[in-house]
Amino acid sequence: MNAVAKNAGQGMRERLVESAFDLFLRQGFNRTSVSEIVAAANATKGAFYHYFSSKDDLLIDAHVEYLGVQIAVLKQVRAGGAPLDEQLQEVISRMVLGVYHYPAHVTLFVEERRSIDPVSAKRASGLRDEFQSLFTGIIVEGVESGAFRSDFDPVTASLGLLGMLTWTFTWTTRRSEKEVRVVADQLARMAVEGLRVHQ
């Protein structure tokens, strides 16, 4: 495939995703048809099925993209070797920004996940497990090293924090990026201060 054809293909895929997301957000996942998606994207059903096997597949594909970005952030922070409290603060701050920059990806998966075909949904489960394991690993190491309090169960703390951070999509979307960076910093400091062992 030459560069021109490749770029044209990428443009079509992006149009289909953007059109689907707009329709899903406005009228719901179940009430949106593939015909409506291709019409809104000025595409054909052939183009749609070239990239996706179903609208469930489209939504999971977008969720996988979001998870890939967040996992890359986690791995980058972990590889930096900073103290564990700084790692956790950085990861939390950047996760809030990730939710802010991928609002439709997060919103649609959270709100429509029960409508998605289980076979399609399973494609993202491994990445969600990997993300949670990496995130929890910071807290586990912090507890084991004495940096974080041992009276908190790391898994419970991890799930609680991830739930809180994911749901920031409900109240940060109308804020500017500058404002969200302040929110991200505050949430990160709040979480770390709650876990840190104070001498």
Image (cartoon, rainbow, N blue to C red):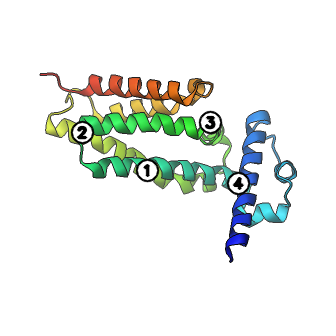
Name the quarter where the N terminus is drawn. Answer: bottom right
Q: Alpha-carbon distance for marks 4 and 3?
A: 18 Å
Q: Nearer the viewer, residue 91 or 5?
A: 5
The type of residue carrying mark 3 is Thr
Give the residue number, with chain letter if any, for mark 1: 71
Percent x, y of residue 153? 27, 32
Question: In percent of the image, x 40 and y 44: which residue is there?
Answer: 132
Disc number lying in front (4 or 3)? 4
**Residue 13 visible to an observer of this rendering:** yes
**In the shown orientation, is residue 137 left or right of residue 34?**
left
Front label number (1 vs 4): 4
Mark 4 or mark 3: whose residue is earlier in sequence: 4
Q: Are marks 1 and 4 in contact (CB under 8 Å)?
A: no
Any mark on residue 14, and which? 4
Say what secondary structure mark 2 lies in: helix
Q: Which mark is residue 8?
A: none
Neighbour tally class for label 2: few under 14, some 14-19, many 20 plus, Cα within 10 Å = many
| Picture disc at residue 107 | 3
Which of the pair 1/52 is nearer the observer? Answer: 1
Q: Which numbered marker is on residue 84? A: 2
